[in-house]
Amino acid sequence: AGSSGFDTSETPVEEVKVGSSYRTKQNVSGKQLDATKAKHELLIILKNRSHVEVQDGTGNRLVRKTFLAGKVITVLGVPPFRVRLGVSEDVRVVYDGKAIPLALPRHGGSIRFSVGHTGFMN
């Protein structure tokens, strides 16, 4: 089950790691990330195939891809993370080692949420 506390033994799991070094147009153009901001870990555990988008607190898009069932996506970056999942059915989210409860729609459709806020949201 690993450190996430979720039983993934019923679904084959393959881990996909994505770091904030993922090159975006902003990174390539010379915009530097604030090295003093601590990086945090976001795990997205998919039981079903789903499109996943993750943007970090600096506005960098870290992930925008469709993943097959059974993937564990590890994202490192500066919070808060803004997340969009194309299929939310049976998804698990872990932020810095703690499970994040999600209000998932019954139909398993697309959801958007954010994690890692340390104050008021805009």
Image: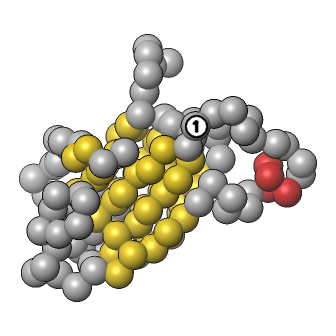
Identify which amino acid the numbered label 1 is placed on. Ala
Instruction: Say whether residue 19 is left or right of residue 84.
Output: right
Q: Position of residue 91 (x, y in %)?
A: 22, 60
Q: Residue furthest bottom?
A: 12
Q: Position of residue 60 (x, y in %)?
A: 65, 47
Residue 29 can be seen, yes or no: yes
Helix, strand or loop status at disc 1: loop
Question: Colour mode?
Answer: secondary structure
Q: Is residue 100 above or below residue 6?
A: above
Quarter of the image where one finds residue 22: bottom right
Q: Which one is in front, 68 or 95?
A: 95
Residue designated by label 1? 38
Quarter of the image where one finds residue 78: top right
Question: What residue is rendered at 45% in x and 73% in y?
Answer: 16
Q: Which one is in front, 67 or 101?
A: 101
Q: Residue furthest right?
A: 30
Q: Mark 1, residues whose alpha carbon is within 10 Å: few (<14), some, or many (≥20)?
A: few
Q: Position of residue 87 (x, y in %)?
A: 28, 63
Question: What residue is rendered at 41% in x and 51% in y?
Answer: 42
Instruction: Say whether residue 66 is left or right of residue 37.
Output: left
Question: What residue is rendered at 25% in x and 59% in y?
Answer: 3
Question: What residue is rendered at 48% in x and 35% in y?
Answer: 80
Q: Position of residue 105 (x, y in %)?
A: 16, 49
Q: Is residue 59 above or below residue 16?
A: above
Badge count:
1
Instruction: Say whether residue 103 is left or right of residue 71.
Output: left
Residue 109 can be seen, yes or no: no
Q: Which quadrant: the N terminus?
A: bottom left
Q: Which one is in front, 23 or 17?
A: 17
